[in-house]
Image: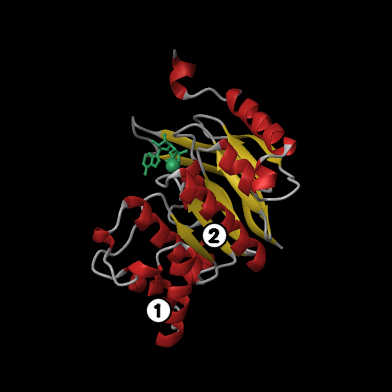
Amino acid sequence: MSSVVVDKVTKVFNQGRPDEVLALDNVDLTVGDGEFVSLIGPSGCGKSTLLRLVADLIAPTTGTVTVAGKDAGNARKDQAYGIAFQQAGLFEWRTVRRNVELPLELRGVSRSERKARAEQMLQLVGLADFAGHYPGQLSGGMQQRVAIARALAVQPPLLLMDEPFGALDEMTRERLQSELLGICTATKTSVIFVTHSISEAVFLSDRVVVMSARPGRITADVAVTLPSRDDAGRQSPAFFEKITEVRQALRGTPAPITAEA
Ligand code: ADP
Ligand code: MG
């Protein structure tokens, strides 16, 4: 079964008003079980909109979204996925550990298991020593890692990630990329991952989906096979070839400023 099927989806914001925006135009996207798919494209091309449609945070204007065989609304109710967005979105009055525990609480997981799972996830993102801190006491990058730990805590079959590593330094970013891949491979988690980084998209993904500037459309779907997803993979000719292929696909889709000039 496919993890996600986006079928002929169009999204219009502010329909019928002078500020009407056609954010997505007739988008089809299928993500297979266990597949890692990145979305890349110029700012404003509708990447976040597409992710928010899958998460049922907004509704399509036309077309349908199916997640794990259910419509997006039922999939959300069944917590069929975990989400980590660009803004960490942590609760300031909860400690780091209790933020990570929150989705487990909502699922009725026992206190001892919650604590153990949260500590394991915090270990993974390198924040084991900060479990008792409050979000306000952490840097932006650390807050983002807490949000990732929280998204992973329920071990969801599908992860939706919107530029989750954007605020991180390069070394932390590469470590988290490897850890994310390790987790997703071990647990057969499907992922839709929004990023601005071509190399990040190529390193992580089975497929890199390239979107064009407004109205957002999918213009290329680049399959990536690397000899390995590690340092050797990052240095392989296949890695550089795919980076070039994605870059050329992106060049075919000028940013709005260029288009209007
Ligand atoms: P991206 O994530 O690729 O940068 P977005 O999905 O955030 O792009 O936005 C796509 C387009 O839709 C942009 O033109 C943006 O201004 C518009 N848009 C996004 N959300 C809303 C909203 N809630 N109301 C009106 N316009 C929106
Ligand atoms: Mg965005």
Looking at this view, is 207 or 244 the one in front? 244
Q: Amino acid at mark 1?
A: Glu
Residue density around tag 2, few if under 14, some if 14–19, many if 20 or more, within 10 Å: many
The residue labelled by disc 1 is: 105
Looking at this view, is 244 or 126 the one in front? 126
Image position of 107 (left or right of 136) = right
Residue 159 is tagged as: 2
* Label 1: which secondary element: helix
Q: Amino acid at mark 2?
A: Leu
Image position of 200 (left or right of 206) = left
- Seen in the picture, residue 138 relative to 156 is either above or below; the reply is above
* Residue depicted at x 66% and y 67%: 186
Picture coordinates of residue 2, whole percent (x, y): 69, 59
Picture coordinates of residue 185, whole percent (x, y): 66, 62
Picture coordinates of residue 19, whole percent (x, y): 34, 32
- Seen in the picture, residue 121 relative to 181 is either above or below; the reply is below
Q: Quadrant of the C terminus?
A: top left
Residue density around tag 1, few if under 14, some if 14–19, many if 20 or more, within 10 Å: some
